[in-house]
Image (cartoon, grey):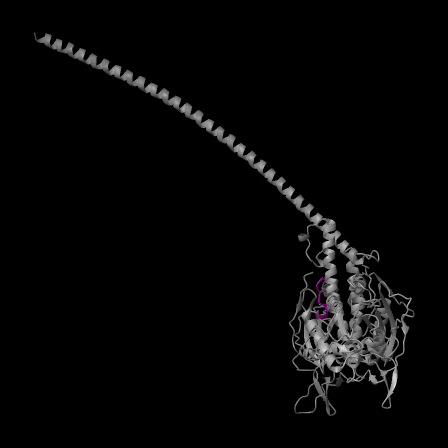
Amino acid sequence: MSKCKSVYYMDKGVRPLSLAGHVGFDSLPDQLVNKSICQGFCFNILCIGETGIGKSTLMDTLFNTNFENFESSHFEPQVKLRAQTYDLQESNVRLRLTVVNTVGFGDQMNKQESYQPVVDYIDRQFESYLQEELKIKRSLHNYHDSRVHACLYFISPSGHSLKSLDLVTMKKLDSKVNIIPVIAKADTISKSELHKFKIKIMSELVSNGVQIYQFPLDDETVAKVNTTMNGHLPFAVVGSTEEVSVGNKMVKARQYPWGVVQVENENHCDFVKLREMLICVNMEDLREQTHTRHYELYRRCKLEEMGFKDTGPESKPVSLQQTYEAKRQEFLVELQKREDEMRQMFVQRVKEKESELKEAERELQSRFEQLKRLHADEKAALEEKKRLLDEDQSSFSKRRAAAQLLQAQSLTANGKKDKDRKNSGFM
Amino acid sequence: MSEAVVPDAMVSPAVGGLHGEKAGGPAVDFSYVGIDAILEQMRRKAMKQGFELNIMVVGQSGLGKSTLMNTLFKSKVSRKSVLATAQEKIPKTIEIKSISHDIEEKGVRMKLTVIDTPGFGDQINNENCWQPIMKFINDQYEAYLQEEININRKKRIPDSRVHCCIYFIPPTGHCLRPLDVEFMRRLSKVVNIVPVIAKADTLTLEERDFFKKKIREELRANGIDVYPQKEFDEDAEDRMINEKIREMIPFAVVGSDQEYQVNGRRLLGRKTKWGTIEVENIAHCEFAYLRDLLIRTHMQNIKDITSSIHYEMYRVRRLNENNTVMAHANGIPEHHLSKEKFHSL
């Protein structure tokens, strides 16, 4: 019986081929898009900024809805993050949007640790995705991706420069998330001041080595608009959900005694640019960068930290498993050792206690014996005394009896004598 | 760091959608947010990245596999293995030949890999002839798994997994042969199988219907789940479409890469003395249905089932088997090893 051996060779060179007619696979992108429509999309935005700077209002304005927000107090002892998820729909596209806001950022007296909760949150999302990916039985296509895709950093409109808190926070976050800095409440800055402010901010970011998100330039269809927009960073935005009538239209705006700041007027602020860049043009790229750059970096660091290495090309799954097993063994051995140690210590202590107790018992026993002896002695002494007393008593009673007898005898003898005298007297 | 994250439950926004109009008063311009622009972004990204498709053709020699591939993709993607002289023996082993081409249509680029299996079913003793093929498919899964497990991963892992396996059934007109049943039974568990009746121009329409019914019955009787698999239908709409397809498989196809003049038009076909069979005419053969299924409508679905179901099953098997292998290697009793996640370290 001839065993069927296999011989296979892959043609390494991939040759281009021209088609003689219409095959039909140009519908492939449509098939892909249809599948995505069925699945729905996921987008997570993190907003970092001081309390009252306008994060929630901007989100409301961006997505044209009223997210349930409530004002936070300025007295939070620590920075917290609040995440809310919404299901939005526009034409046939369903979006699961998660907006994460910082609460109490910049309110504390000591802001050294302010960035830490944010970093921890981002890491936690990466961690849960990594865990899902490493599971044996996993369901990645059903997984609700909670990794932060874009981070809007709200800069206070001081007009001068970035605060040190801003620089420190952004430096810590730039390798973990796509940072898009925005200047909040831009209606408080005049145009010329704004221009100088933007230049100052960008130069400070560059000189401090902070890598903010650059809109991608590799796709020709959007390269041009992205390049222009890259030059307008950071976007100076104004948010408002109130409508004011301007001309014969109702527009979103802020009404002041001296005029109306229209949110969607490009001469007034960069809101439209932000919406365009964040949502209409680059949403997919933001998601992709998060997955291929930030997440991969996190995964690499985490796995290396856990001790995994890419050893040889032959046995990668095994080596990962091997390292895992080795570590597990190590861990189990360590655990066993600790357990033994603890047990030993326990036994030791028990012994010690036991001997202590025995000692005490012995002491007690000896004291008891002593006391008993003492009692016995006393009792003996008392008995002795009693005996003596008894003896005394008995001798005394004997003597008394003897004395009484004697007395009685002498009485009768005297009486007889008397009688005799008496008797003799009369004669 | 006692920092609390309060994730609120899923909330629908107060407004029903992002488009809306207020009744009465000046028309409110609820301006368009632009979320659906993401579809366009996805499309752009997909076009830029290009697609990959790996099709395997399995069948005895002479059934027209290469011709069918060439007809499907309207170009010479597969070289016909014509044995030149009688001296050239039939290969003693099953070879697996994988040839890749870059094709492009209307801006959509695709790397098409056709995996041919000359020698399948050609020996006198064909026991275990599926083994090399099974091994090849598993090797592709293994390569992908290794790439995925790497610490330093590539941005885009090259996908060489077999997405679809077209199995050619010789047009005997009776029923499936034991070789067919055995092969399909084993391979339907690891790859999407699309059975086709080759050289269907030797069957009349009645014979064809009878043959197809017989084949369907035998597939059902043997528990062979060919593509589209019943258990992977996602919703009612899917099920409806797929039921229609399931009633038509296996497709009776005729392949041809030569054009003939028919009724004033140049069409792909086979010219014989009694007439010209038009390959793309659905009254003549079911090639068009096959092409539509494979390429125009279900290509993405085929790839998805491969990556999310077949590959995942392989991965689970492989990772579990490593567990037990390591257990025996380290002398740990198996019940101590639980299928834990890596993070439990």
How far from the left and from the top, in percent, is residue A161?
82, 71
Magenta residues span: A133-142
Which residue is nearer to you in this view: A301 or B137?
B137
Does residue A399 belong to the magenta stretch? no
Q: Quadrant of residue B184?
A: bottom right
In the rendered image, is residue A69 in sight?
A: yes
Magenta stretch contains residue A136 = yes
User: Percent position (x, y) of residue A210?
Assistant: 83, 67
Q: Position of residue A259 (x, y in %)?
A: 75, 86
Q: Is residue A185 visible?
A: no
> Residue drawn at (29%, 18%), measured in percent from left and top?
A397
Q: Which residue is more in the foreground, A21 or B279? A: B279
**In which quadrant is the N terminus of chain A drawn?**
bottom right
- The quadrant holding residue B188 is bottom right
Q: Is residue B317 left or right of residue A375?
A: right
- Nearest the viewer among B283 and A33 is B283
Residue A298, image quadrant: bottom right
Q: Is residue A215 left or right of residue B209?
A: right
Q: Position of residue A78 (x, y in %)?
A: 69, 64
Quadrant location, the C terminus of chain A:
top left
Query: Relative to A46, does residue B345 appear above or below in the rendering?
Result: above
Q: Is residue B263 above or below residue A371?
A: below
Count of numbered labels shown in the rendering: 0
| Image height of A379 relative to B219, above or below | above
Identify the residue at the far left of this view.
Answer: A427
